[in-house]
Amino acid sequence: MNINRWDVLLLMRPGLTAPVDAASLAVFRMAFGLLMFVESIVYLKNGWVRELYVAPEFHFTFLGFGWVRPWPGDGMVVAFVIMAAASLMMALGLFYRMAAFVLFLGITHVFLIDAAEYLNHLYLICLIAFLMIFAPATKIWSMDALRKAKPRDPNIPQLWIWLLRIQIGIPYFYGGIAKLNGDWLRGEPLRMWLARRSDYPGLGKWFTEEWVVYLFSYGGLLLDLAFVPLLLCKRTRMLGYGLVLCFNGMNAWLFDIGIFPWMMMAASLMFFPPDWPRFGRRKKPAISAHHEPLARPLLVGMAAWVAIQMLLPFRHWIYPGDVAWTEEGHLFSWRMKLRDKQAQEMTFRIRDPGSGHEWGIEPGDFLTERQKIRMAGQPDMIHQFAIHLAEEYRKEYGMQMEVRVDAVVSLNGGKPAPLIDPETDLATQPRDLRCKPWITQRP
């Protein structure tokens, strides 16, 4: 009997479609929607929408997405208002598919506008928002379910539970793998960050103690690697979730990482049995003998999604050198809180190839202070800005200028060293996925 690789998925179909209670997915839908509603309101209230997406004259872009731009005028404010409304509709389960699709488009647009604002939690939100478009998250406890004339089957295929578990577990597990590096194991950059927070009431006085530094470093490493196994095992699940609460609560207290800790606290509940929200006080819904069909394209799409998510974080292996220094393969790899780069020098030199005249440019004349700081240790952003400078001078003077940069950077408290070859004209270098020879290797 000949079986191709897609038939394997089809043979697994009965197990994948085994019906389970929709309660946990419904609660996750509510939590995700409410967190996104709060995040949208916070951005509007604090003026971050205008500060980050409207005020800057130049935006760093992700490779292949240079066409993504902020909406003109008050468009970005309107976009966040729409996202807030879509998030609330998602939480209520009202016109759910449309709300989930609008939220996905909105948050992905915001994420892609400026690479200087890259955050792992925004990336995770984009991924989850995409999955939630297709998830049967309104079977129960939703306005859509109440609007239906006939009662709906309160069960969902367990595949959706496992797909979200995998997506939620990946940041934990890969975040732990990424910590298996020399800097983290010797306590950096946590040693520097904790020292900066030594003025915290109560515990702050301990943050400069070496045993505390190593407790945080090795404790964070072990917890990241252990979370998924602990949450999957029935005997250790409550211990695992208690550690999730403590770990993410500490991160929320120590680091400015937005809603990421709260998102992970809520998302980790997906590792509990699907009927956990009923707390055993209500009779479980009858399990239908009918297995909801899953089409081959959906199964193939899910398999491809999981494969990409599991392989993408390892792409930095194809590049030479230390990824924390070169940044090649760093993004989208769950390499969280692993590096602290301080720019000792950052000067862009413009040269007229005809006359040989050369002059320096202050990045602050073109970038916001936040963009300038974010650019300092990231070669791709430095490259983008060099190309931008060359284009601006070409428009003004009608000739192609050469752009070189003196970028001296310190990584995780190490010795300052040039990050970019100062003799390379970055304006002529292609921006693509290939290894960049003009990025130096870590000293």
Image: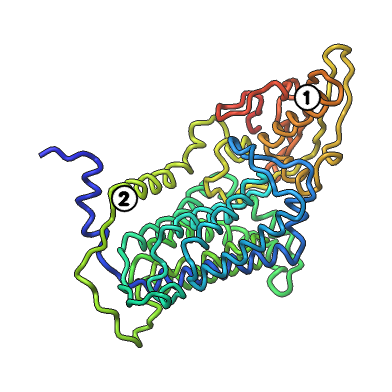
Q: Dot 1 corresponds to which residue?
A: 403
Name the spot of residue 53 as percent of width and height, x first: 73, 51
Mark 2, secondary structure of its residue: helix
Q: In which quadrant will I find the N terminus? A: top left
Q: Dot 2 corresponds to which residue?
A: 299
Name, please, the residue furthest toward the left. 1
Q: In which quadrant will I find the C terminus? A: top right
| In front of the other: 354 or 181 | 354
> Is residue 235 shown to the viewer in this render?
no
Mark 1, secondary structure of its residue: strand
> Is residue 91 shown to the viewer in this render?
yes
Name the spot of residue 171 as percent of width and height, x first: 49, 54
Name, please, the residue furthest toward the front. 149
Horizontal side, residue 232 vs residue 95: left or right: left
Name, please, the residue furthest toward the bottom. 281
Label 1 or label 2, whichever comes before in sequence order: 2
Find residue 422 and report its image quarter: top right
User: How many numbered marks appear?
Assistant: 2
Q: What residue appears at the point 28 percent right and 48 percent down from the top-left corner?
A: 296
Find residue 192 and report its image quarter: bottom right
Tell which tag, 1 or 2, sits nearer the viewer: 2
Please state which amino acid type lies under the numbered disc 1.
Val
Name the spot of residue 383 as percent of width and height, x first: 70, 31
| In front of the other: 305 or 88 | 88
Q: Residues within 10 Å of mark 1 (few under 14, many from 20)?
A: many
Q: What residue appears at the point 21 percent right and 39 percent down from the top-left corner?
A: 4
Q: Work out how far the residue at label 1 is from the one at label 2, CA to CA, in angstroms.
A: 49 Å
Horizontal side, residue 328 vs residue 3: left or right: right
Please state which amino acid type lies under the numbered disc 2.
Leu
| In front of the other: 173 or 107 | 107
Q: Is residue 163 above or below residue 306?
A: below
Q: What residue appears at the point 47 percent right and 65 percent down from the top-left corner?
A: 96
